[in-house]
Image (spheres, grey):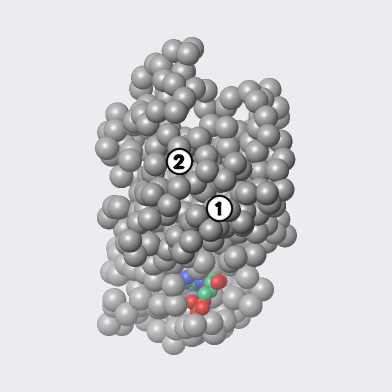
Amino acid sequence: MSLASPAECGGAGLSDVDCRLLGRAVELGRLGWGRVHPNPMVGAVVAREGRVVAEAHHEVFGGPHAEVLALHGVGDARGATVYSSLEPCSHRGKTPPCTEALLKAGVARVVYWAGEPGDAAGGGGAWLARRGLQADGPFGERADWAAENPFFFHAPELRRPYVALKLAVSLDGRIAPREGRRFWLTGPEARAEVHRVRAGFDAVLVGSRTWEADDPQLTVRGEIEPRVAPVPVLLDRSGRADPGLRALSGEGGPRGIVFTCPGEARGLARRLGDLADVAAVPAAQGGLDLVAILQSLNECGIATVLCEGGGTLGSALLALDLVDRLYLFLAPVLIGASGVPAFPRGPGGDPESLVRVFRGWRSRLAPVRFGNDTLVVLDRGA
Ligand code: AOF
Ligand code: ZN
C-alpha cells in the first residue's frame, strides 16, 4: 500500500498532500520492524504548509514514541500539522502520552491513519479535538492497518500466536526439484529479505523435512539487529533431532524448542541436553498436533511465529486455518511436474481444501521485487 492518493488513504476530505504525508508516516513506521514489537510500528511527520520539517519513527520498544521524537526534531511546532500512522496514544505507559506532548507543543492539527485499538491508549483523537486541535482520523480500514502492523492488530481472542508462512515458489508452484535436498530457488536479494522478515518474529518454525534436508541456522544475518533474536522451533515427531543441528548449536543464540510426541520426549531431551527445550504434544494428522504446538508457544510468551516450511507443514497449518499471512517469494523459474509442490496433497491437507481456506485472502501490501524474484504478501480475511 502506498497511500499516494486520498482514495488509497481511505480519507474523504483529505488532500493529496495530506495523503502523501500520511503515506510517508506509514513508510517511516516500517523502519521499526524487528525493534519495536510488541509495540506497533509508528511513523510521524511534522509539516508546515505541506512541507516536511521533521520526521521520526518509534525506534525501539520502551523508547519514545514517533510523535514525540518528531516534535523533538523541530524547535517550535506551534501551528504545525503532525501526521502519524497511528492515533496518538492518550495513556502513560512506559512513556508519557503523545496527546499531551502534541498539545503542549502548540500543534494546530493532527492527521492520523490507523485507530489506536488499545482501551487504555485509545481515544487520543477525541481527546485532542476536545482541547481545540483539529484531529483528522482514523482513515482506511482495520484490515489495511493490520497489513502494516499485523502483530499489533492480531486478535488476542484466537489465543494463539500470529502465524506467517514463508514459501519460495517456482512459477509452477514447486519449492524444490526433489525431496530431501537443499535447494536455492530465490536469489541473494530475496534471501536477504527473508533475514529482514525473520528479525520481526519471536520464533522461526520448521518441520522435520526442512531441518533434515537443509540443516538451516534460522538466525537473523542481515541489516537489522533484532531487539530479541527469534527462537528456533523444530518439529520432530520421531525424535531424531541431533545435537549437531545448526539451528540448535548456534553460539549465543536463544535456546531452541523441539516439539516431539510423548513417547520420544524423554530420550530426545536427554540427547539434546542444554541445547533445546523439548516439549511433548500429541500426534495428529500424520504429524504433530499443530494447535497444541501453537498453544504451547503462546504459553511460552511467543506471540509471533514465522514458519519457513516446508510445504507439508505449511499446507497442514493452512488446512487448519492457522496461518495469518503468506510471504510468497516467486522465482521466475519452472521446475516441472516432478518437483516438490508448495501445496502438497497428503496428511496435512489437499489443495482442494486450501481453495476454501484462501477465500477472502488479499494482497494488501504492494508486491516488491528482490533481484529476479517477487515477494507477494497475502493476508487472511477477517
Ligand atoms: C503512539 N505513538 O509511536 C507508538 C504508540 O509503553 P509505551 O509508553 O511505549 O506505550 C505503548 C503503547 O502505545 C502501545 O501498546 C500502543 O498502544 C501505543 N503505541 N502510540 O502514539 C507511537 N508506538
Ligand atoms: Zn504515544
Amino acid at circle 1: Leu
Residue closest to the far top: 337
Secondary structure at badge 2 equals helix
Placement of 294 over or under 43, stated as above or below: above
* 184 or 81, nearer to the observer: 184
Placement of 351 over or under 93, stated as above or below: above
Q: Position of residue 66 (x, y in %)?
A: 40, 71
Mark 1 residue crowding within 10 angstroms, few (<14) / some (14–19) / many (20+): many
Which residue is found at the position 60% from the left and 33% from the top?
Answer: 315
Residue that mark 1 sits on: 268
Which label's residue is closer to the chain start, 2 or 1? 2
Placement of 10 over or under 229, stated as above or below: above
Tell me how far mark 2 sits from mark 1, CA to CA.
Answer: 16 Å
Q: Position of residue 52 (x, y in %)?
A: 30, 64
* 168 or 48, nearer to the observer: 168
Which residue is found at the position 44% from the left and 87% from the top?
Answer: 104
Residue closest to the far bottom: 104
Instruction: Decide if ligand 1 comes within 8 Å of the CB at mark 1.
Output: no
Placement of 215 over or under 222, stated as above or below: above
The mark closer to the camera, 2 or 1, is: 1
Looking at the image, residue 264 sits to the left or right of residue 196; the answer is right
Residue that mark 2 sits on: 211
Residue 224 picture quarter? bottom left
Q: Total marks drawn?
A: 2
Q: Position of residue 193 (x, y in %)?
A: 34, 45
Q: Position of residue 332 (x, y in %)?
A: 35, 22
Secondary structure at badge 1 equals helix
Which residue is found at the position 52% from the left and 27% from the top?
Answer: 342
Which residue is found at the position 28% from the left and 69% from the top?
Answer: 53
Amino acid at circle 2: Trp
Residue 165: tell me if it is visible: no
